[in-house]
Image (cartoon, rainbow, N blue to C red):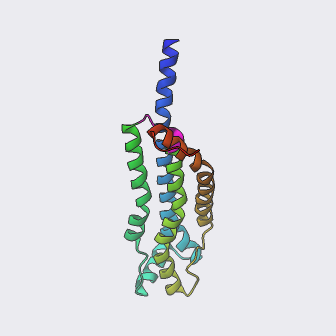
Amino acid sequence: ARFMSHTAEVSRRQRPVVVAVVGTVVVVAYALLAAVQILVLNPLAAVPGAELSQIYADVSAAGESMGAPLVLAGLAVGPVVAVGLLLRTRRRPDGEARIVAVQYLALVALGAFGYFWASFGPGMALADTYGISGGDHSPWAALLQAVSGVAFVVFLMQAPGAVSMARRTRGGPQRR
């Protein structure tokens, strides 16, 4: 019985860390797909039949830039925050997994804004170079937006409970 109790306690204490690891993997995967979407898939879909190197050469010849360093720097914000949350959770694993999950859901939901910001310049460069719309031409953008949308809805459903749970565990003021 003592072993089972200890095992259950260790498992309960590890849940937030497991959630943080999964959350970090999801945020990093989202950012990687967003980078590939912005810098590879969307240009190829915007200019069907052209090689990626030719698209980049055309954009450069038009005095525009796909801005890869800025895209990558902008998209790195989410993973950096996710790793920070993971490290904090590993140092203090006594929190609740639900609270950790809500933080990662917020990050994934905010990924839509990060994607828009990071894709704006390259989209405009393609638009100016080829006289096309600066919007997404590849269907993979819809997947990113859907993932962010689902994360936002789940965040809205879970956040009130996580906030009250955080107040209880930290001894903060309670709503009555």
| Highlighted range, magenta | 93-99
Q: Residue furthest front?
A: 176
Q: Position of residue 146 (x, y in %)?
A: 63, 60
Q: Which residue is painted at 51% across and 66% down in the image?
A: 113
Q: Locate the C terminus by quadrant.
A: top right
- When the figure is inspected, residue 47 is found, relative to residue 87, above or below; the finding is below
Q: Residue at x 41, y 66 (%)?
A: 74
Check if residue 96 falls in the magenta segment.
yes
In this view of the protein, which residue sits in the foreground, 56 or 148? 148
Q: Image point 51% across, 61% down: which residue?
A: 111
Q: Position of residue 57 (x, y in %)?
A: 43, 80
In the image, residue 5 sits, relative to residue 86, either above or below, namely above
- Would residue 58 appear left or right of 152 to someone viewing this image? left
The image quadrant of residue 93 is top left
Residue 158: percent from left, percent from top:
60, 48
Instruction: Determine whether, in the image, residue 86 is placed left or right of residue 46.
Output: left
